[in-house]
Image: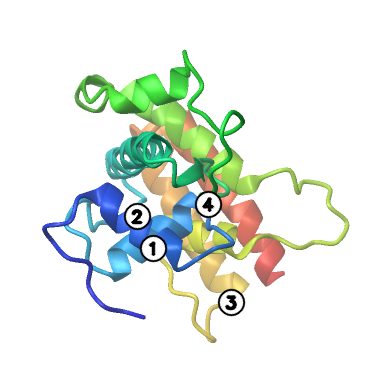
Amino acid sequence: MNDDLEPEQDLAEQILLLLREQPDGCSEYELIQQLKARHSTHIPHLPLIDKLVLFRTHFLVFNALYRLRDRLWGECSHHLQISPLCVQLQPYVPGTSGITTGDPLRDYYLDMTNLRDTDEAEVERLLASFWSRMRGDQVGDRSGDWDPEQKRAALELFELDSEPGLDMAAIKRRYRQLVSIHHPDRGGSTTRIQSINLAMEILQRHYR
């Protein structure tokens, strides 16, 4: 289904609509891509390669998720699992799925001043954390399998399309370009290089 989301809908309502279509849940990255594909006007429609775009998109989505979780619990209709790797509507179970008091993540994402006041250094740290999660726990996994979401995220960071003609030679050329652009000696940052290296590691496993 590729229908546009209603522009007057709140982001939380748009997310609820998408999650109802996916009872098994989805990752944060997949949810963002679906919002973009359905032309949501509530998130930036720009590549996640830009660290400020990545942070703003992530924050807006998680703000909506925590608002939605509070609402669904108040309505006694669902519990909402919130994780970068799995966002899922779950059955409402009184006494077991309630909102945890003193939840620091909920408090952080519901405070919109954090969206306004987070500086570039903090965004760099969050970016490195995002790519570490995308890398996951599969280092040393002998099966050699990586989640497709990791592959898509890495390709987006490299601004490459997953097309039949894409090969390791093209990926390496793009990798060298990105390293040259973002190297600390040229005004880049160590955390950005780390993100590029982690994405390259993911793509090497997919295209080796």
Q: In percent of the image, x 34 and y 28: which residue is there?
A: 109
Do the CB atoms of the residues marked 2 and 1 lie less than 8 Å apart? yes
Mark 1 Cα-neighbour bin, 10 Å: few <14, some 14–19, many ≥20 = some
Using the image as rendered, state which of residue 152 and residue 206 is in the foreground.
Answer: 152
Q: Is residue 155 above or below residue 80?
A: below
- Residue at label 2? 15
Q: Is residue 136 left or right of residue 65?
A: right
- Residue at label 4? 88
Do the CB atoms of the residues marked 2 and 3 lie less than 8 Å apart? no
Residue 18 bears which disc, if any?
Answer: 1
Gap between marks 4 and 1 measured at Cα: 10 Å
SS category of the residue bearing label 1: helix
Amino acid, disc 1: Leu
Q: Is residue 32 left or right of residue 128?
A: left
Amino acid, disc 4: Gln
Q: Please, which residue is most extreme toward the top here?
A: 102
Q: In percent of the image, x 40 and y 30: which residue is there?
A: 124
Gap between marks 4 and 2 measured at Cα: 11 Å
The number of numbered badges drawn on the structure is 4
Amino acid, disc 2: Ile
**Of pointers 1 and 3, the one earlier in the residue sequence:** 1
Q: In percent of the image, x 83 and y 52: which residue is there?
A: 141
Q: Closer to the camera: disc 1 or disc 3?
A: 1
- Residue at label 3? 167
Amino acid, disc 3: Asp
Q: Is residue 123 above or below residue 135?
A: above
